[in-house]
Image (tube, rainbow, N blue to C red):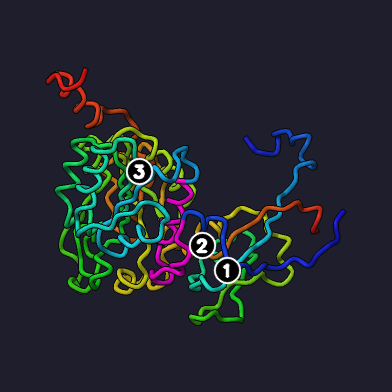
Amino acid sequence: MGQKVVLRERIVDESPRDDLIRRERFPHIWCPGCGLGTVLKCYVEAIAASNIPPDKHVIVSGIGCTGRIAGYVRLDSYHVTHGRPIAFAEGMKIVRPDLEVTVISGDGDLVTIGGNHFIHAVRRNVDINVFLVNNFIYGMTGNQMGSTTPLGAKSSTSPYGCPEPPFNLPLLAAALGAPFVARWTTLHVRQLADAMKRAMNVKGFAFIEIISPCPVGFGSYNDLRDGRDYIKLFLENCIVDHSADLNKVGITLKPGEPIILGNFIDREAPTYHDLELEVFKKAGWLK
Amino acid sequence: MSLKIVREPINKYMQKIPLGLIHIIPERCKECGYCIDLCPKDVLEVGDERNIKGYRWPRVADGKAAECIACRMCEWICPEFAIFIVEADRREYV
């Protein structure tokens, strides 16, 4: 037996995952309590667990707080114009089908400003992964309401409550035929990393909606001023139901109304790449 | 049906509970409190010392270090990659 030592925390200056993050840029710019660091952690863990080497992974992100994720990963990372990361990623995947292209961006970027790119990429079933981080608001520009703000939630441009019903994103993606649709929160870290790993191995468009705390932006208007309030909300209201009826998974954030999570859809569908090769064969361009 | 009628595994007393050694990178901490709140064994608490940005990084509460079971929840939830667990053999330390 070795000598007994007094156990306490040990102070170090690098973490075992520093090989996949740009450690010289840490600590990152996100607010205390923001869920984006946890999303980054889950993404990095999913890369390490997927059997794809890191130099085959590419990350594309748009504008917004979430768009900063691309700058903190030690991969080939692209930070593109507002709302266009899916269009950029589609082009990259079509030209280089050997790459594993992942888009991580916010709700305002992907479904509000880039909404048309989103629906047409799902319709075409291009083999990319889209991880949409939903904080219910345009965080970086000053907490304006967007297309995912729940009905009645307050923001800087809807101080008496949002008058519009929000997107039901898993239903939207499933209705357009996405082969993999999931929703998790940043509290469900292991499930989120597993879903990301599955999304990287799915053939076709994989969509994960990640519900993330925004205590400084959305929270300051809606009595969720601390990251711990969000954790309490998630612990009390989240229900995991993989076979949920997608018509009923919309988010209201009202007390007593559940937030339904799960890997809702996992099916096979012909990808854009397969269909394109068939056309090429028919045209006689391929032997 | 109660759980009591289910037979206990015969090797129950041979099962080892893992021990986690807590490693902290103080300069990255932003005092969000997730590691402290979500620890199932309440091993961590808010520390006294502040880092260069003025945030108090967590420390192990008095006498709680041996209670860490290496579930790694703090490591997974930490948005800053500022805390991690190294699993060790409990017999060498406790």
Tell me the residue that label 2 is attached to. B81
Closer to the camera: disc 1 or disc 3? 1
User: Which residue is at a point 29% across and 41% down the rendered structure image?
Assistant: A128
Kind of residue sitting beneath label 2: Phe
Q: Residue at x 80, y 65 (%)?
A: A5
| Residue shown at the point (45%, 47%) measured from the top left | A193
Q: Which residue is mark 1?
A: B25
Question: Which type of secondary structure does the marked residue at label 3 adopt?
Answer: strand
- Is circle 1 on the same chain as circle 3? no
Q: Give the image location of residue A27, x and y in percent.
A: 46, 70
- Seen in the picture, residue B76 relative to A217 is either above or below; the reply is above
- Tell me the distance, in whole angstroms, between the alpha carbons under discs 1 and 3: 33 Å
Q: Is residue B24 left or right of residue B77?
A: right
Disc 1 vs disc 2: Cβ atoms closer than 8 Å? yes
Image spot of residue A226 (x, y percent): 42, 72
Mark 1 to mark 2 CA distance (whole Å): 8 Å
Residue at coordinates 45% horizontally, 41% vertically from top-left? Answer: A53
Which residue type carries mark 3? Ala
Please identify the quadrant where the C terminus of chain A is shown: top left
The residue beneath circle 3 is: A182
Disc 2: host chain:
B
Q: Could you tell which of marks 1 and 2 lies nearer the N-terminus?
A: 1
Front label number (2 vs 3): 2
Q: Characterize the local packing of mark 1: few (<14), some (14-19) or many (20 or more) Cα atoms within 10 angstroms.
A: many
**Location of residue B10 in the rendering, given as x and y in whole percent from the top left corner:** 78, 34
Q: Chain of mark 3?
A: A
**CA–CA distance between discs 2 and 3?**
25 Å
Q: Give the extent of the magenta segment.
A: A21-47
Q: Secondary structure at mark 1?
A: loop
Give me the chain letter of mark 1. Answer: B
